[in-house]
Amino acid sequence: MTLQIDPWRIEDACRRAWPAVDETMVAGWLARSSGGPFRRINSATPGPEAIPLGSALPALTDHFSALGRPAILRIPDFAGIDEAAIEVSCGPPEAETDTLAMALRRSVGPVLPVELHPRPDSEWLTARAILAGETPQATVLTSRLVTSIADRAAFAAIRRDGRIVSLAFAVLHRGLAIFESVRTEESWRGRGFARDCMLALLGWSRDQGVELAALQVVRGNAPAQQLYADLGFTMLVYRYHYRFPLPAE
């Protein structure tokens, strides 16, 4: 089966799976702001009607400046942003990320017992923050964002010694399953825990009638890339990266 997926559809689903506190359209760019250290929810991404970067950049810079933050541009490679304008206006690309997809088919289930819940409780949220190495301030923000997800979702967890040591979650939007926060405690890695969390969520997504799955992973994260390839995420739909506009001379 050859997948034909509109990348804008994936962008929309990923946005809903990791929501921002505020979203504002600025010159056809979706400017997301939330505070905290996270680029994805504190950056501007071109929409289908985005005006050229050279014209949009002053408005974007002013928008983020009013929020007390630097402008960060998130550039998907399919959005048609002029490369010459990017090179003139911005610094080098950072955090290049792959967007991968797969068709959901009947597959083996997890080997280990995996808990699945429709909403994250305080224990799950605390475990996610610890496994992500977040500061207390970042934890407050991400807990707020995760609990604000409006679409149907499932939150997976594997326990050892009575505590959560591996987790992930999936969000369903318009027939697409998006996977986020795949984390395992360092001392328990290499035992298939993340794979089993993903298998449980993939099975749950398929049982909800979803046929397509997608996720985003930093290109340099070799273990995660291998895990997702083994699970069947072998279709590269698009890539994106971040840029910081250069100061005006």
Image (tube, rainbow, N blue to C red):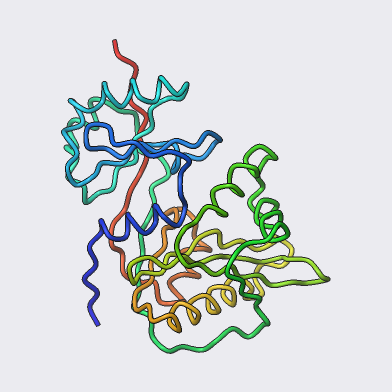
Please, which residue is most extreme toward the top here?
A: 249
- Front residue of this view, candidates 147 and 238: 147
Instruction: Pick the residue in front: 223 or 60.
Output: 60
Q: Residue at x 30, y 42 (%)?
A: 75
Up the image or down, 46 lies above or below 143; here it is above
Residue at horizontal 43 percent and vertical 38 percent from the top: 22
The percent coordinates of residue 163 (x first, y second) are 78, 66
Looking at the rendered image, the quarter that the N terminus falls into is bottom left
Q: How many marks?
A: 0
Task: State left or right for residue 102 relative to residue 164.
Answer: left
- Above or below: residue 87 compared with residue 109: above
Residue pictured at 63% horizontal, 62% vertical: 120
**Residue 126 found in image quarter:** bottom right
Location of residue 235 with respect to 211 vertically, above or below: above
- Residue 57, located in which quarter of the rendered image? top left
Quadrant in which the C terminus is drawn: top left
| Image-quadrant location for residue 136 | top right
User: Residue drawn at (19%, 39%), measured in percent from left and top?
Assistant: 50
- Residue 193 rendering spot, x and y as whole percentages: 64, 73
Give the image location of residue 20, x and y in percent: 46, 44
What x and y, as percent, mark residue 43? 39, 37
Q: Residue furthest right?
A: 161
